[in-house]
Amino acid sequence: MTGDRETHREEEKVSFPLKPVLIALGPEEVQRLLAIAFDGQAEEALAFVREELLKRVEKALARH
């Protein structure tokens, strides 16, 4: 079963070269991240990654 997951992950990999990306976080975002970390809120953490970080990474990569 682990092999199936690894194969699926490889299929999802980006097919173009990636570059380093720096993302600045404001005080509210840092506070949200710390609250997520201390409270162990998995769903909230996933939402933050999807709603905030992923959008910023995509935007930063579009600039390159």
Image: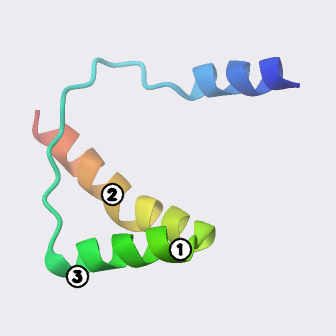
Please, is residue 5 above or below residue 33 in the view?
A: above
Residue carrying label 2 = 53
Q: Would you call the spot at circle 2 few (<14 residues within 10 Å), some (14-19), or many (20 or more)? A: some
Viewer-nearest of discs 3 and 2: 3
Q: In which quarter of the image is the C terminus?
A: top left
The Cα–Cα distance between marks 2 and 1, rounded to whole angstroms, is 13 Å
Residue at point 46%, 60% (across, down): 50
Pointer 2 with pointer 1, Cβ within 8 A = no
* Of pointers 3 and 2, the one earlier in the residue sequence: 3
* Of pointers 2 and 1, the one earlier in the residue sequence: 1
Residue at point 18%, 39% (across, down): 21
Please, is residue 18 above or below residue 62 in the view?
A: above
**Left or right position of 11 against 18:** right
Q: What residue type is labelled 1?
A: Glu
The Cα–Cα distance between marks 3 and 1, rounded to whole angstroms, is 15 Å
Labelled disc at residue 28: 3
x then y, percent, for residue 43: 61, 70
Quarter of the image where one finds residue 15: top left
The Cα–Cα distance between marks 3 and 2, rounded to whole angstroms, is 14 Å
**Left or right position of 24 against 40:** left
Pointer 3 with pointer 2, Cβ within 8 A = no
**Left or right position of 48 against 63:** right
